[in-house]
Amino acid sequence: MTFSGEFLAFMGLALVAIIGGVLLLNLNKVVHMVVALIFTFVAIAGIYVLLSAEFVAAVQILIYSGAITIIMLFGIMLTKHDDESEPKTGKWRKILLFLGIVGFAFAVYIGIYNFDIEQVPTKLHENNTMQIGEALYSKYIIPFELTSVLLLVALVGSIILAKNEKKGADKE
């Protein structure tokens, strides 16, 4: 096993993604959980950059780290959430969670340590963004447009639901 800069960058980004996921599971305040989720999403985008998938990394940052996180924060603000009513996690639960994570990491390490994969020359890194755009706007144009209509309907529906809850609160 050779230690190159790419390997060290991958290990650092993977560590940040795993720590963000563990923090997401262990934090008590919902806003702190969302911040841990943002760290995980940004680390995954960095891994995409290492894989020469710049378009997917940009979409990861824009869609997940930006839009999905903002939607989650709006959902938190629009709902009645009481942080004090959540049960406190015990010491044994945290210990078992840590042991499970260490056991999973060990099993993955054992599973891929001497796993030989034949390397085949490919042309994956040549104009990958252009290839995605051509496929999206030629072969997959109907699903792309249906997805945009579905997202628009979801947006209008969420606005209507938020207005109905506000009117119900005003009557009381």
Image (cartoon, rainbow, N blue to C red):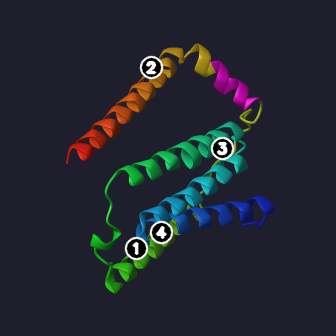
Does 67 appear above or below 77?
above
Secondary structure at badge 4 equals helix
| Residue 3 location (% of width, % of height) | 77, 67
Residue under pointer 2: 146
What range of the chain is rendered magenta? 127-134
Could you give the CA–CA distance between mark 1 and mark 2, rounded to whole angstroms? 41 Å
Picture quadrant where residue 162 is located: top left
Residue under pointer 4: 22
| Residue 56 location (% of width, % of height) | 64, 39
Circle nearer the N terminus (1, 2): 1
* Horizontal relation, residue 108 to residue 97: left or right: right
Q: Nearer the viewer, mark 2 or mark 3?
A: 2
Picture quadrant where residue 116 is located: bottom right
Residue at the (51%, 50%) spot, across then down: 69
Could you give the CA–CA distance between mark 2 and mark 4, rounded to whole angstroms? 35 Å
Secondary structure at badge 2 equals helix
Q: Which mark is residue 57?
A: 3
Assign the N terminus to one quadrant of the image. Answer: bottom right
Which amino acid, by three-letter code, is at mark 2? Leu
Which amino acid, by three-letter code, is at mark 1? Gly
| Residue 26 location (% of width, % of height) | 42, 72
Could you give the CA–CA distance between mark 1 and mark 4, rounded to whole angstroms? 11 Å
Q: Determine if the magenta segment contains residue 156.
A: no
Could you give the CA–CA distance between mark 2 and mark 3, rounded to whole angstroms? 23 Å
In the rendered image, the residue lying farthest to the bottom is: 91
Circle nearer the N terminus (1, 4): 4
* Horizontal relation, residue 102 to residue 96: left or right: right
Which amino acid, by three-letter code, is at mark 4? Val
Tell me whether the residue at label 3 lies in contact with that at label 1, contact meaning CB atoms closer than 8 angstroms. Answer: no
